[in-house]
Image: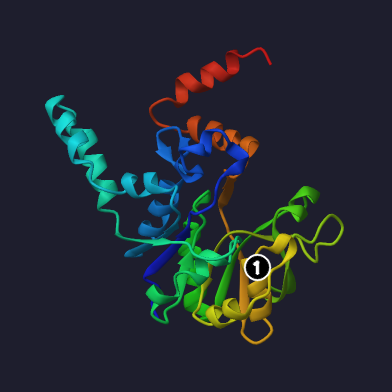
Amino acid sequence: MKITKAVIPAAGFGTRFLPQTKAMPKEMLPIVDKPVIQYVVEEAVSAGLQDIVLVTGWHKRAIEDHFDYPYELEKRLEEWGKSDKISELRRIADFANFIYIRQKGPYGNATPIKSVEHVINQEPFLVLWGDDFVLATPSRAEQLIAAYNKYEATILCGIMTDNPSDTERYAFVDGVDLGNGVWKVNRLIEKPGIGNAPSKLAIVSGYVLTPDIFPVLKTQKPGRGGEFYLPEAIDILAKDHPVYAIEIKNGKYYDTGNKLEYMKTVVDIAIHHKEINGEFRAYLKSLDL
């Protein structure tokens, strides 16, 4: 069955960025001239997906506004003769069919997935988080979808890492290396801790899920801290259904969920930005660090 929907959870509070995120969703933090979540949406759309399901909360109206038509702003831009800006705003609003769902339920990254069952219609769907992204060729979304088309099963997005601190941030795969960056998952261990990771393949930033996940989510018990973790639900799923993980090729992972990684992302994108890269590179070289 063809994948046509992308689910983007964006309901977290962004406490690591307070007070900035008191009034601004963390997904709307700018990476030069685009918010983080726009990179994510553009990737899903470029992979041919037609419906973008954004799972938000009461404090995320700015996300809905960003992907809407700003009539008053367009009129001002028209008066100022900035037609190129109008075209860009309309392009953003026309990206896809946007569906907004308010997250309901306990805290944890499994909850937004549970919240979208009624709009999935028993179809496989792509999941991309709203506060991180991967720049890759082909795109991460295209690689995940291609793997699903081959295996017709749950597919996990992975990167290889031997950084000990990553074992306290991500889930890791315990499974069989099938070669060419593909693993058959036996277990998925959430945040195994230093010295306990079963492999170097960390699951960081995206999934293709099948409707088989929903019965698991309905009976899932809370994990550490009382949270409901999606990797733990997938670990349960893998006991009865095939699950595969792929190492994303020709890509770089950008985690904007904490201050340091966010600033690294801004700098990395800025030094390649066509409008400012030359001057910005010169400025960085001028710094007496």
Residue 88: x %, y % from top left:
26, 40
Q: Is residue 82 above or below residue 123?
A: above
Residue at horizontal 52%, vertical 50%?
133
Q: Nearer the viewer, residue 19 or 172?
A: 19
Question: Can you see residue 201?
Answer: no
Q: Is residue 10 above or below residue 267?
A: below
Left or right: 258 with respect to 279? right
Left or right: 77 with respect to 268? left
Determine the image quadrant of residue 207: bottom right
Q: Nearer the viewer, residue 240 or 71?
A: 71
Give the residue at mark 1.
231
Residue 215: x %, y % from top left:
56, 83
Q: Nearer the viewer, residue 47 or 29?
A: 29
Residue 96: x %, y % from top left:
29, 59
Residue 15: x %, y % from top left:
60, 42
Q: Is residue 46 above or below residue 66?
A: below
Q: Give the amino acid at mark 1.
A: Pro
